[in-house]
Amino acid sequence: MLLPVVFFLCGYLILFACLTPILDPLVTVYELAFSGANAQTIEEPGADSIFNGSTGRTGGTLNWDDFTFPVYGEAFGHITVEGTEIDTDLIYGDSKSLLKRGACMSLYSHIPGCGRGVLVGAHNNTYFHTLQYVEEGALVHLETTYGAYVYRVYRTDIIENTDRAGYAEELNGYKEILLLYTCYPNDTIASTPYRFFAFCEKVSGPNVNMYE
């Protein structure tokens, strides 16, 4: 009787381990589904911040030991978006509590400069409440503790919260794309089945080599 139970538990754990890398980015986007949670809104910005203003570094290459890598929950940068009112801290990690403090970068993406997808989200009635008004061609200025980055919006889209394929190529590809997202539309107080995405290509900023 005990042996089948052991096999069942082992099979479950293996399945969970295999699916986690696939499901976690989707869960990150799905967590913004409940705008009602946004009602707890905002906490004082600047808490747990290691960001002290622009470094002025706009190019070159950094190795992993050239800067202090942020830890979970730290504000390690600042983001502004042309043509919107977005002007807020950039937090490393995302959770209900962190989303009260600013725009949150998913741990299942990459930090700016790595040449891969950078996934940043915030609530639609607080820090990203004007994201849906951004226009193609607008510049996104993203300052971090190690460099100053500029991205350009090249596409916007409205994607169902369960449609990971709608952004997977940009998130997992080998080109640096900044993905900004929030719930859509922004005038709802109940759960929202859609996300507004702004896809942004890198214009400038130092490259980060995490492997040397």
Image (cartoon, grey):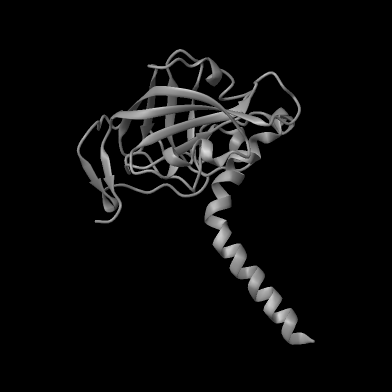
Quadrant containing the C terminus is bottom left
- Residue drawn at x 30%, y 47% is 67
Residue furthest right as drawn:
1
Q: Position of residue 140 (x, y in %)?
A: 39, 23
Give 47 or 3, whichever is nearer the viewer.
Answer: 3
State which quadrant residue 53 falls in: top left
- Residue 103 position within the rendered picture, expressed as x and y whole percent measured from the top left: 52, 32
Q: Is residue 204 above or below residue 71?
A: above
Q: Is residue 16 left or right of residue 157?
A: right
Number of numbered discs present? Answer: 0
In front of the other: 190 or 103: 190
Image x and y of residue 129, in percent = 59, 20
Whether residue 41 sits left or right of residue 70 in the image: it is right
In the image, residue 22 above or below residue 102: below
Residue depicted at 69% across the width and 18% down the height:
187
Compared with 111, 143 (above or below) is above
Residue projecting furthest to the left: 60
Residue drawn at point x = 58 percent, y = 43 percent: 28
Inspect this view and state whether residue 47 appears: no
Quadrant where the N terminus is found in the figure:
bottom right
Taking 12 as reference, is 136 left or right? left
As drawn, is 211 to the left or to the right of 90?
A: left
